[in-house]
Image (spheres, rainbow, N blue to C red):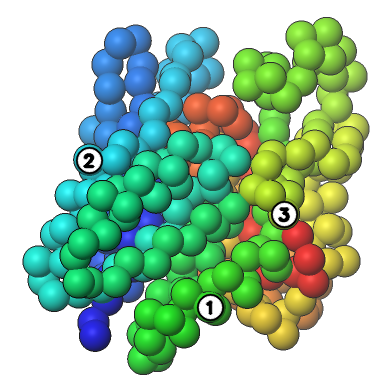
């Protein structure tokens, strides 16, 4: 039977890619000054540049998860077309959206159509890379069961590595103490973080200065990537395209036959927590 892949806007994919791969994207929302915006992939409600400018000016953005009713609506729309559904959800360790999807599926269990739900344990373009590779398998004619198995086998190899430029955003999210953020800012310490096997955001290394932190991202990729799984690399950034291009150039200079297939903005849902200047690389590794 035909099926649809449903994902979240936290994938930070482009709208063009969502269209090409026939993805159904359920958007999350973000809030600025008591006004709620839908985090569409094309950023139609607020330009992504405007969003980051507001963050730089000190505006605080908060985010909200997808609720049960929104997932039920998305699933039923596909059921009405006679399609089964594969949901690839934002990491359950970072959002309640996965649990909302689980409840929605339970509420619809009497329906004859099939629904498979995956906790991707991923975020931003890491989640996006997972969805992209799954959609490519679907385009090759793989069944929903085959893609479901493929995705679950891929998750432990989906590496997320990133560095932030403004430590105060980590402080606000509870990842860094106030004193640590201030001291780190004074000393120009740039943390290197990743998403672990449980889908949690974990600090791993420290670099002194912006350039060294970007170099470290590339060296981690070089040391851990497993191109036998996929040669695709995605890069995302918090409104710092120049740094993202620098990372791309350094990855290509490794001469390992890798394909930096996408450079895109970190969307508002992730960007509200990581801040302007964040740069991230995503690839398939021996292990996360």
Image point (76%, 76%), residue name:
226
CA–CA distance in space, label 3 to label 1: 17 Å
- Return the x and y of residue 63 as percentages of the image width and height: 42, 27
Question: Looking at the image, which is closer to me, 243 or 163?
Answer: 163
Q: Residue at x 54, y 72 (%)?
A: 151
- State which quarter of the image contains the C terminus: bottom right
| Residue 58 visible in this rendered orientation of the protein | yes
| Residue picked out by circle 2 | 69
In the drawing, does residue 61 fall left or right of residue 242? left
Q: Which mark is residue 149?
A: 1
SS assignment at label 3: loop
**Residue 151 in the image: above or below residue 179:** below
Q: Which residue is mark 3?
A: 197
- Of mark 3 and mark 1, the one earlier in the sequence is 1
Whole-angstrom CA distance, mark 3 to mark 2, is 29 Å
- Asked whether the residues under the numbered discs 2 and 1 touch, taking CB atoms below 8 Å apart as contact, a structural biologist would say no
Q: What's the CA distance linking mark 2 and mark 1?
A: 27 Å
Instruction: Give the x, y percent position of residue 92.
Output: 54, 44
Q: Quadrant of residue 110?
A: bottom left
The answer to whether 59 is drawn above or below residue 273 in the figure is above
């Amino acid at each position: 039977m035909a099926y649809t892949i449903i994902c979240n806007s936290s994938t930070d994919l482009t709208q063009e890619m969502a269209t090409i791969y026939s993805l159904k994207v359920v958007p999350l929302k973000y809030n600025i000054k008591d006004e709620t915006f839908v985090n569409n992939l094309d950023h139609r409600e607020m330009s992504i540049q405007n969003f980051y400018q507001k963050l730089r000016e000190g505006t605080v953005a908060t985010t909200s998860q997808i609720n049960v009713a929104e997932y039920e609506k998305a699933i039923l729309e596909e059921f009405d077309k006679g399609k089964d559904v594969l949901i690839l959800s934002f990491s359950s360790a970072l959002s309640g959206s996965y649990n909302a999807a689980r409840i929605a599926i339970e509420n619809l269990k009497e329906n004859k159509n099939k629904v498979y739900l995956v906790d991707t344990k991923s975020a931003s373009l890491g989640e996006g890379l997972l969805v992209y590779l799954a959609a490519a398998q679907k385009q090759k004619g793989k069944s929903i069961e085959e893609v479901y198995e493929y995705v679950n086998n891929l998750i432990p190899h989906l590496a997320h590595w990133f560095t932030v430029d403004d430590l105060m955003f980590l402080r606000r999210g509870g990842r860094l103490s106030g004193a640590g953020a201030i001291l780190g800012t004074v000393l120009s310490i740039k943390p290197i973080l990743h998403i672990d096997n449980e889908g949690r955001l974990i600090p791993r290394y420290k670099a002194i200065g912006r350039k060294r932190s970007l170099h470290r991202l590339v060296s981690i990729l070089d040391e851990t990537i497993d191109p036998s799984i996929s040669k695709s690399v995605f890069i995302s950034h918090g409104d710092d395209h120049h740094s993202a291009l620098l990372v791309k150039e350094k990855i290509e200079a490794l001469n390992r036959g890798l394909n930096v297939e996408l450079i895109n903005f970190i969307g508002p849902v992730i960007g509200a927590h990581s801040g302007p200047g964040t740069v991230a690389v995503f690839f398939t590794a021996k292990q996360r």
